[in-house]
Image: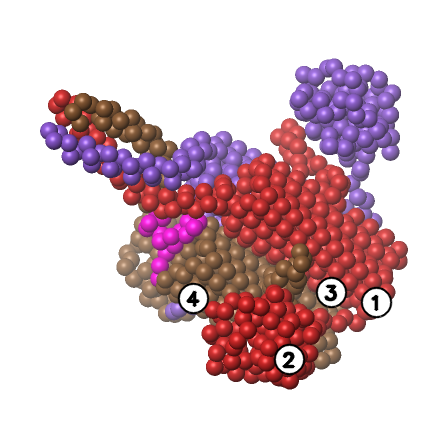
Chain colours: A brown, B red, C purple
Amino acid sequence: MQKTLSELAQIVGGKLIGDGNTLIKAITNIETPEKEALTFVTEEKFLGSLAGTTIAAVIVPPSISQFEKPLIQCPNPKLAWARLLWVFHPARAFDGKSSEKAVIHPTAKIGAGVTIESFAVIGENSVIGDRAVVRSGCVIDRNVQIGAETILQPNVMIYENCRVGNRVILHAGTVIGADGFGYVMDAGKYFKVPQLGNVVIEDDVEIGANTTIDRATMGSTIIRRGAKIDNLVQIAHNCDIGEHTVASAQVGISGSCTVGKYVTLAGQVGLGDHCEIGDQAIIGAQAGLPTGKKIPPQSAFLGSPARPLEDMKKQFAAQLRSAETLKVVRDLVKRVEALEQVPGT
Amino acid sequence: MQKTLSELAQIVGGKLIGDGNTLIKAITNIETPEKEALTFVTEEKFLGSLAGTTIAAVIVPPSISQFEKPLIQCPNPKLAWARLLWVFHPARAFDGKSSEKAVIHPTAKIGAGVTIESFAVIGENSVIGDRAVVRSGCVIDRNVQIGAETILQPNVMIYENCRVGNRVILHAGTVIGADGFGYVMDAGKYFKVPQLGNVVIEDDVEIGANTTIDRATMGSTIIRRGAKIDNLVQIAHNCDIGEHTVASAQVGISGSCTVGKYVTLAGQVGLGDHCEIGDQAIIGAQAGLPTGKKIPPQSAFLGSPARPLEDMKKQFAAQLRSAETLKVVRDLVKRVEALEQVPGT
Amino acid sequence: MQKTLSELAQIVGGKLIGDGNTLIKAITNIETPEKEALTFVTEEKFLGSLAGTTIAAVIVPPSISQFEKPLIQCPNPKLAWARLLWVFHPARAFDGKSSEKAVIHPTAKIGAGVTIESFAVIGENSVIGDRAVVRSGCVIDRNVQIGAETILQPNVMIYENCRVGNRVILHAGTVIGADGFGYVMDAGKYFKVPQLGNVVIEDDVEIGANTTIDRATMGSTIIRRGAKIDNLVQIAHNCDIGEHTVASAQVGISGSCTVGKYVTLAGQVGLGDHCEIGDQAIIGAQAGLPTGKKIPPQSAFLGSPARPLEDMKKQFAAQLRSAETLKVVRDLVKRVEALEQVPGT
């Protein structure tokens, strides 16, 4: 594919500065400033590394208007760049057919243009929305609903009664709706509490590879619209994960947690049961929240047990000095003892 | 389904207080006190939220005998409630047949009433016990034994020579018997130590989704009777996990650990090689045990590195004040210096 | 199988001490000193436990030359032992055939002696090297290259365009090449950055069960020759993992990290984005490295946030005393106040 710079400026609604006839044959990143390619910078300081390279043009924020190459000014250069990546690399087209080597229950309702690859299984009364893609080895149990244009990568497993929205992406090996981890002790044995609820995944959610989201004991475990969940994340029964919230890899969320909108959970964060995380809160990597912890909206927390970021930074700084502090204290004890023994005091 | 309250009291062996003819059409939780439904409370303080609701009746401990609704007194109300959930929602019935789209080796021995779904594979000389269920996409390698009434959810993988007991549940995507992580350095390369042992899972174990349990180098990695293992847990080669022990999600247990009976490992706990955890010990979330750590029976540990819970709580409390303490110490140093310079001292 | 001790000494290039006609029927570990078996010790102090047992002979380091049993002296006894384990337990032979129940795209190139089991899928233009093994349920997408003698255990999933070298082992359920976790905020929604790169796994790598390695946004996520990655590890987009590096179970490596050669990452270690780990560095279990952290070669780090091992040990020791230290400081404050109030000072 090739486009002129003015065509690309128009696609992203940016302001062209320089030669609009500049031919762009690739969209690239700043580390590989190829010939006839377009990249982006978010700040002036990054422009230097592009000076003198063969890069053809640069997407820049409105604060930048001069450079040795043609520019496209955009309020969010990275977003414009990502949009143009899709123009040059359109989403994969699937064939819209059901493989003869898939097993589709006769009662299942398969929408228009659905792709179902070999060795996929679609259970009784399940519904697959238009143009959805179910790749090889996926197992969709009975009474499952999958929305339109949703993509299930290979070997995704969805237990009965779960619901997945439109334009959702579930990466390979992810398990939706396995039993919540619930038992009652009975004369020295754990008695299993039946897990009767389901998982509801709303529209525009993306879930990484080998992640597990358990069904609710009763009611629903909910992943709300636009949430992005990375690989190997555990979300337990009855959690409610807010709209446009991000959970990085290996996050673990225990039962009945409520996570607000636009929250960021960094890698390996752990939440005990019944935590409540306010909207737009940020929880730093490896932080641990004890059972029932409430995090205010728009706050940042770090550490295990977690506390407000600024406090935790001070605590970490003091802990760095803790061996030294211990020595100082021991020395002080001796000096105070000496002072106390001075006659007349 | 519907039952009278007296029928339900009889099923759970509880003492009826109030109108035994009360009709119960659902078993529910305290958050959804529906009409004609039965729920439970474990303590008097929770009863308040049910007052004035449409709930039909409540299972209570023997300490409670008065309420505006009929009651069933039981020593363990939650257990009685879980039992009645099973009455109203019996375990799923499978069809007891082998799919023509499964691949079953001619030497495999398939018990009576076994369900084997499409695209499952049963290897040479493997044995599947009566009424077991092998769901779609499971791969059971050669010489594997699966007990009676065991359920393998979709895409469970069991490597050769492993043994799984009766009434075991393995959730989707779980891998049993992959090679232990063992190498010897050989002239700058890691040389693989063959992993010749297996995994033995005893009766009544439940293992969560996408969990991995490695085979022993020699001998067996053992998960003993009644243990409950959550999602995304790693159990390395040659571990021995005791009866009725619980490991929450994302726990990691390194090689050759011995974990006693009735132990609780909370979420994201990590054990180094050769740890020994005594019976009934409790290890708090995200705790880390260094190689070879021994934890006494009935003790509680927390933190990384872990120490006894009460000590760790005090340590955490002191660490919270560590930035402030550092300031106080610096101030003390100055004041002691000043005192030391007083003439005559 | 049975061999004489002198045959075995010859195989491993060791020096025989004692009766070379001693018949060896098994290779065992020190915990199970069976009759007619050979084991090894790495240090003299471990020999004691073999005295008086029925063990037939022992592999020892050159520093040991006397014992009640025949010996084979080797510079690396464990390596010699591992080699003999392979002699007594040769690697599994697969049948070198493609199952009729696999789906192999007509454009795929399948090497000589390749085994492809039932319900495996090989995509368009993919290439499988000679004598490779693709076990049941694996899904190899289009344009994937798999090297010679590589083994893919059941249900391994490889996304399009990825490359896997020779003699690689990928354990069950592992996902190679899922999308990197990259988004740009766009008017309150996350806009997905297309993930256009791939994963390159070089020769002699072994990757554990249910591990996830994401494709690069552009370019390649690289796992270099001889690296050993355990179960449930997450390696994000654009990481570069050095030759002969080890990552234990549940390690999480964020985007664009560079990990050197011969590095050891212990269990549950977490690396933020853009970390750089020098060659031969050792990162202790559960350590956490903040974004952009650089670790020098041959250093050892521990803790979260991580610092040099020796410093962290001192910090941990001081933290153990932090509750007590707090008390001492409070007492000192009172004593200094008292001293300050002495008349004349």
Give the structural element (helix, strand or loop) at label 4. loop
Residue B239 image-quadrant placement: top right
| Residue A310 appears in the picture as rendered | yes
Give the structural element (helix, strand or loop) at label 1. loop
Question: Which residue carries the number 1 mark?
Answer: B113
Mark 4 closeness class: few <14, some 14–19, many ≥20 residues within 10 Å: many
Q: Residue at x 74, y 79 (%)?
A: A106
**Residue type at mark 4?**
Gly
Query: Are the residues tagged 3 and 4 within 8 Å (C-beta)?
Result: no
Q: Residue at x 21, y 30 (%)?
A: B336
Give the label, 3 or 4, closer to the camera: 4
Q: Mark 2 and mark 3: span between their CA atoms?
A: 40 Å
> Which is nearer the N-term, disc 1 or disc 3?
1
Look at the image and say whether residue A311 sits in the magenta stretch: yes
Look at the image and say whether residue A330 sits in the magenta stretch: no
A37 or A298, nearer to the observer: A298
- Chain label for disc 4: A
Q: Find the magenta span and give its range.
A: A298-313
